[in-house]
Image (spheres, rainbow, N blue to C red):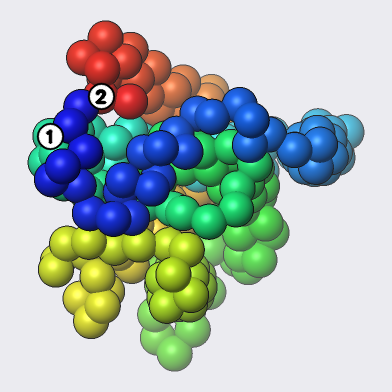
Amino acid sequence: MTTLAMTDASREAFSMLRDPSNLHWYVVTFFGIVMYVYATEVERKRWDIIAAGLAFFLMDVFNELINSAWFHASGRAPLWTITGDTAYLILIGWTIEIVFLFLISGIEFVKFLPSDKSLRIFGVPNRWVFITWWSCVCVFVEVLLHRAGIFHWSWWFWDEPFLLPIVVFGYGTFFWIAATVFDMHSHRRRYAVVGAMAAVDLVLAIGLGFAGWL
């Protein structure tokens, strides 16, 4: 893939992509923390929380695969990319630190949800209030990282001040699927959704991998 048409940030990130020399020991510690979080929910037999956490993460995997495909199709830049210090850049906008964070983010989110699904906040169903609030918080963090010069947006429709697409598609879908899976009435339905999401991600990853677009 030629680097001549790439943005500076994309070129820097591309040079870091899957470079094993960037790996650090704290990755092992982060992995242990994630395993502890899931082990706690397994011990409590909270399969609804575990399913929600996995659904959240698998939605992130899908987005990152699409972001990688966008980068290779455009030849210029992904929708988002990362530069600066990272232990390992897996895809053009996906670091090992983000993987560990998003593996537990869905679990954290559903723990905030009221047990009463019918509860309204200012007349709005509480699930939508929490989805909107946490999506906005996450985008606010991305804005700070973007202004710090280590997180980059390169397309006018996915950048300041046009933040609504990022709120909706960058995070809103993550929190929505986590809440939806969490609120389902049976574990069979929950894990049918999680299994379908995993299958879609796997097929997409294999296809993009064979195309050389990862």
Residue 206's x, y, as percent? 33, 12
- The residue that appears at 20% across and 47% down in the rendered structure is 6
Q: Nearer the viewer, residue 179 or 40?
A: 40
Q: Which residue is mark 2?
A: 213
Q: Which residue is mark 1?
A: 73
Residue 76's x, y, as percent? 16, 46
- Compared with 53, 205 (above or below) is above
Q: Residue furthest front?
A: 4
- Compared with 32, 143 (above or below) is below
The quadrant of the picture occupied by the C terminus is: top left
Q: Is residue 185 left or right of residue 59?
A: right
CA neighbours of label 2 inside 10 A, class few (<14), some (14 to 19), many (20+): some
Q: Is residue 140 left or right of residue 101?
A: left
- The residue that appears at 42% across and 78% down in the rendered structure is 147
Q: Residue furthest bottom?
A: 122
- Compared with 212, 69 (above or below) is below
Identity, as a three-letter code, of the amino acid under mark 2 = Trp
Among the two numbered marks 2 and 1 on one chain, the one whose residue lies closer to the N terminus: 1
Residue 167's x, y, as percent? 33, 67
- Compared with 191, 170 (above or below) is below
The quadrant of the picture occupied by the N terminus is: top left
Labels 2 and 1 touching (C-beta < 8 A): yes
- Spatial distance from mark 2 to mark 1, Cα to Cα? 8 Å
Q: Nearer the viewer, residue 103 or 11?
A: 11
- The residue that appears at 46% across and 54% down in the rendered structure is 83
Identity, as a three-letter code, of the amino acid under mark 1 = Ala
